[in-house]
Amino acid sequence: MIVRKSPREIEKIAAAGALVAETIAHVGSLIAPGTTTDELDAAADSYIRERGGIPTSEGYRGYPKAICISPNEIVVHGIPGPYPVSEGDVITIDVGVTLDAYIADSAYTFAVGEIDADAQRLLDVAQDALEAGIAEARVGNRVGDISHAVQTVVEAAGFSIVRSLVGHGVGRHYHEDPHIPNFGEPGRGPRLAEGMTIAIEPMITAGSSEVVVAPDGWTISTADGSLSAHFEHTVAVLEDGPRVLTPRVGLVRT
Ligand code: MF3
Ligand code: CO
């Protein structure tokens, strides 16, 4: 069942989304060679709580940390720990915040210092794909229109889509219906209607689309060790077009 939100509820998700965006920018400002992902997680945890929010991931299905931090070949759900960030890494920061009982979810992949041209292209394409998906989040379109737009951008660039992981409805719960796959046919799937709030989140790789789950039960990495990128926004489907509820602050690209 897809829950549509009232204008009042959408403002609450937007308030959570503003805190998500500020947290991503704050963590991004702390990313530097030598900083551990545990230190970044602790900074995110206090930043969110000091502003009245709750890190949604903490305790979600037993997840042990405040946010997910996924370096390099880790696609999603990297658990913060002793890993020290190093020059040339790409680091995905994925943040969910619950504020006043409403939830927003967003992710951004940061480059640490100078990265390879190929790595930079992977990040650029993932962002382009997210933007193309958001543009299709319109009343009357179908989920497949979003999926197809994302897929087209990623595959035209020669990169792979992780098919076993998908975007999702979000707002009252972290993960709601519908699934938002990053591949699919235009004109297929559930119809988008006013008030739906969805997380669109291309997860792409420079190599194969296969992923493996680590023994910790969370960390999902590319099977071939290739680099991956992940960008996510929470978006409201409104009569006058898509509204990004997690607009970037303090970053070079939206
Ligand atoms: N933020 C992730 C998403 O985009 C969900 C993380 S669940 C967690 O859907 F428990 F690992 F944090
Ligand atoms: Co999500």
Image (tube, grey):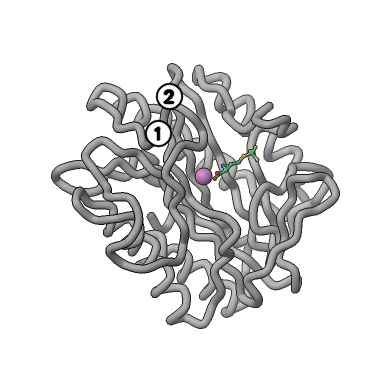
Residue 8 seen in render: yes
Instruction: Name the residue rendered at 64%, 62% in the picture.
Output: 90
Residue name at image x 51 percent, y 82 percent: 158
* Quadrant hosting residue 234: top left
Displayed quadrant of residue 102: top left
Residue 47 against residue 210 in the figure, above or below: above
**Residue 231 in the image, given as x and y percentages of width and height:** 49, 55
Q: Looking at the picture, how far across and down is residue 23, in whole percent?
A: 52, 36
Q: Residue at x 45, y 19 (%)?
A: 101
**Crowdedness of circle 1 by 10 Å Cα count: few (<14), some, many (20+)?**
some
Location of residue 16 by image quarter: top left
Q: Report crowding for label 2: few under 14, some 14 to 19, many 20 or more residues within 10 A (C-alpha).
A: many
Give the residue pinned by disc 1: 18
Let me know if residue 249 appears in the view. Answer: no
Q: How far across and how far down the image is residue 133, in percent?
A: 35, 60
In-front residue for pair 232/93: 232
Judging depth in this view, the residue of 143 and 172 nearest the camera is: 143
Q: Amino acid at mark 2?
A: Tyr
Relative image position of residue 182 (x, y in whole percent) = 46, 62
Give ligand 1's quarter of the image: top right
The residue that label 2 is drawn on is: 102
Q: Secondary structure at mark 2?
A: strand
Compare marks 1 and 2 and give the one earlier in the sequence.
1
Secondary element at image label 1 = helix
- Amino acid on which disc 1 is placed: Ala
Instruction: Determine contact: label 1, label 2, CB under 8 Å.
Output: no
Disc 1 and disc 2: Cα gap in Å?
A: 12 Å
